[in-house]
Image: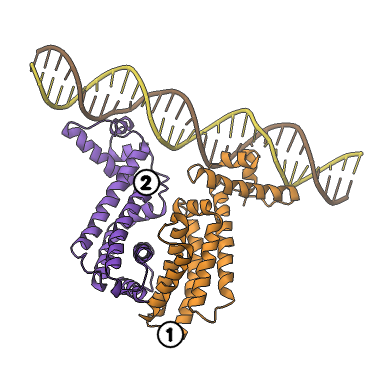
Chain colours: A purple, B orange, C yellow, D brown
Amino acid sequence: MRKQPRQERSRQMVERIVAAGREVLVERGYDGFSTNHVATAAGISPGSLYQYFPNKAAILDEVVDRYVAESAEQVTSAMSDRITALGPDLVRDVADALVAVLEADRALLRVVAEELPLARSRARLTALERQVREVSTAYLAARPDLHRRPPAAAAWVMVLAIENLAVRWVLDQPAAVSRDQLLDETVALVSGYLVS
Amino acid sequence: MRKQPRQERSRQMVERIVAAGREVLVERGYDGFSTNHVATAAGISPGSLYQYFPNKAAILDEVVDRYVAESAEQVTSAMSDRITALGPDLVRDVADALVAVLEADRALLRVVAEELPLARSRARLTALERQVREVSTAYLAARPDLHRRPPAAAAWVMVLAIENLAVRWVLDQPAAVSRDQLLDETVALVSGYLVS
DNA sequence: TTGTGACGCGAGTATTTGCTCGCATACAAT
DNA sequence: ATTGTATGCGAGCAAATACTCGCGTCACAA
């Protein structure tokens, strides 16, 4: 950020910029995300953007960061209460929470998941994945009696599988799989895998 | 295509354009994929591009179409011989073939999988997914004695899971999972899932 | 050999882009 | 009130972009 907003007025402007950025990103896609469009959508002048953001990418980063952060928070909070028991219930609830978060703004999810070339957005996601993976690995390693897979590899497989199924289900809305069915199959996938 | 190349000379030029397009896409990414760059890389003039391609997107489409088509062919040929028995061996061999194909050009895979905003490329991939899914669904429906999942949903889950694990393994090269391990876990995931 | 159309060129155009800079205004402190 | 600073404006620049067009060159059929 190029300058710190000191007055309330300018703090609101930063918010307006980020909100407009999100809006433009959803409505015009990654290719249509231009500084002039964002400025227009925010009802401000192009020059004002650059008071607080060094360049176009910074605006995009902020938009994506906020989206990923708020989504991550929802999911991790669904996990945090119940780390003690990695059972079918937890898997189902986490998958449920994940799907719910992704459903909240499908249009934005589509752009972020399918268009953004930014290494930045992947970095944020990867960090979340790693965090979940480490917790899972630790649990699997502590309870070898409950499964028959190598902990590290199994955690990697499960996290990616659950995440990807949820994302693709929300984006593609396959007719053959209802929402409940998705959760059922996710649970079956994980539990069947762990004991095989 | 705007004009059909009639002479050998012009047919070679089309090939040069597509090859240069692939090269530019890999080296400069989606954002750097400009008509001028492609023309330069092909050693031709910008005007010559537009003799055979109506616009920039058409060049990109051709590059991606060829990549997806040639990859799809490799995978489907690994399946076609053995459709009769959807067992652990087949799963492992298909996953193996898939990983091999994806490994062949990681740089291009990265751009196609993580940058391209084209609905076009997803459409091609989705078609392949659907094809594999239908074969799997038919098999699962014909052999209800071998598993306990709803065929259509199970096929959807398996195809996406296998595909995504392979792609992410090739792109991320996780230290915790060797190539053999990936295949082992994939087989375990599928077989454990089907009987649970 | 010659004529005709396919071919290729590359300077050029119109547009869009990210971004700047000089200036006017709003605010806070004295 | 006055002064200093934070804020915002918007015309406009330099660069890049997708794409065109008139002209020369080439291959091939007659």
- Examine the rendered structure and indicate whether residue A175 appears above or below residue B11: below
- In the picture of the structure, the residue carrying the numbered disc 2 is A120
Residue A65, how many percent across, how many down? 30, 47
In the image, A84 versus B74, the foreground residue is A84
Depth order, front residue of A10/C12: A10
- Residue B115 shows in this picture: yes
The quadrant holding residue C4 is top right
Along the line of sight, the residue nearer the viewer: A42 or A52: A52
Q: Quadrant of the C terminus of chain B?
A: bottom left
- Secondary-structure class at tag 2: helix
Per the image, the residue denoted by label 1 is B146
Q: CA distance from mark 1 to mark 2?
A: 44 Å
Q: Chain of mark 1?
A: B
- Residue at image x 27%, y 51%? A69
Please name the residue shown 51% across and 63% down the image: B99
Measuring from the top left, give residue C24's x and y in whole percent: 24, 20
